[in-house]
Image (cartoon, helix red, strand yellow):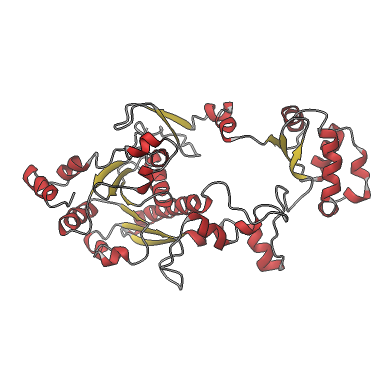
Amino acid sequence: MTAVLSGIRVIDITNVLAGPFCSYQLALSGAEVIKVEVPGAGDLARQLGADLELSQQLMGASFIAQNGGKKSMTLNLKLEGGKEIFRRLVRSADVLVENFRPGVMDRLGLGYNALAGINPKLVYCAISGFGQEGPMREAPAYDQIVQGMSGVMSITGDRHNAPYRVGYPVSDSIGGLTAAFAISSALVGRERTGEGRFIDVSMLDSTIATMGWIVSNYLIAGLEPEPIGNDNFTAAPSGTFRTGAGLLNIAANTDDQFASLAKLIERPDLVGDPRFLTRESRKRNREVLTLLIETELRQQPAVYWEDQLNKAGVPAGRVLSVPQALDLPQIAHRQLIRKVSNVAGVGKEVSVVQGGYRYSDADAPSDLRPPTLGQHTEAMLRDLGYGSEEIESFRAVGAI
């Protein structure tokens, strides 16, 4: 079946994570993504990852993670030759994604206003730490900076050890997903208006926007958020519990779920205990309730309780390591992990993670091989109408 974004050409001039993750989502939906990189160096992520040999070959694991299925061409956008090629590429594009600091593309003469004059249908998305306007617009931003400034770190951990950063680059990832959603929405809008538009994505805004309940409790009720570790601030018993072997997450959020839990651990008396009669009273007495439940859970391992609780209608799941999670039969069934072979510049089969969604009437991309630096430069130049002599002249002056 035809991919959802088949026929959409995306120019990706982003680096490291948020921007590449955005354009990777578009590639997974069938868009042609052309990654424009600096000659000789490319995306910094090419040098990052746990496989040092791949990093030295500019095919680092961090790069492979979110650049499958893309094309790579090298252009020096500081030289007029590189700019000429870039402008011609823009004429054929539907989308451009960049994550430079605000103003960089304008200073190159390649900002939205200049490019919209070339291609009025262009959807131009700029991803930055704090947005294109405002007092912090030019401040540098990495994921950890945004995690800290968004308040995420202040509520991660418990009252004894917070703040903690989330264990993966959550703000980069949220920023990338936000951008991909905004771009897709703009493409739908373009079908009605025939015109492109400028999209300003702030990683700070995007991160705070996902903290809905936390933020609204403060804005509406004046409740200042506090770190409560692995407990669910909305209910109890709901959090992480010790068992006879392994940790277990339990979400007995309703009265019925609490009653089922109490019955299963052979403590039905807990339901009638005045300390635990209501959702709010259980929250107030969370610590003692947790101790009472864990006393019974220690009689069996987490894998036993996971099975029994779920059968009883109480949501439960073991706390797994990343390797254990990737080894789940559910992950294999949904084919989230894709093995990719015959990757240029990589002497072995590699695995990539696809998107967390499936279309009912469209196949997954057939080719998710990540590109070597500049692998498609000459082919793209010929596609844009340049001949051999012109290509050699661009190469001679360092434009490609």
**Residue 134: where, in percent of width, then height?**
45, 72
**Residue 154: where, in percent of width, then height?**
64, 59
Viewer-side residue, 325 vs 395: 395
Q: Which quadrant holds residue 66?
A: top left
Q: Residue furthest bottom?
A: 135
- The residue that appears at 10% across and 45% down in the rendered structure is 392
Instruction: Please give the count of numbered marks on the rendered protein.
Output: 0
**Residue 127: where, in percent of width, then height?**
41, 58
Viewer-side residue, 10 vs 358: 10
Viewer-side residue, 53 vs 214: 53
**Residue 356: where, in percent of width, then height?**
50, 39
Quadrant occupied by the N terminus:
top left
Q: Is residue 72 left or right of residue 213?
A: left
Q: Is residue 46 left or right of residue 79?
A: right
Q: Relative to 332, say whether 191 is above or below.
A: below
Q: Which quadrant holds residue 222?
A: bottom right
Viewer-side residue, 27 vs 287: 287
Q: Relative to 290, say whether 85 is above or below.
A: below
Q: Is residue 20 left or right of residue 93?
A: right
- The residue that appears at 70% across and 59% down in the rendered structure is 226
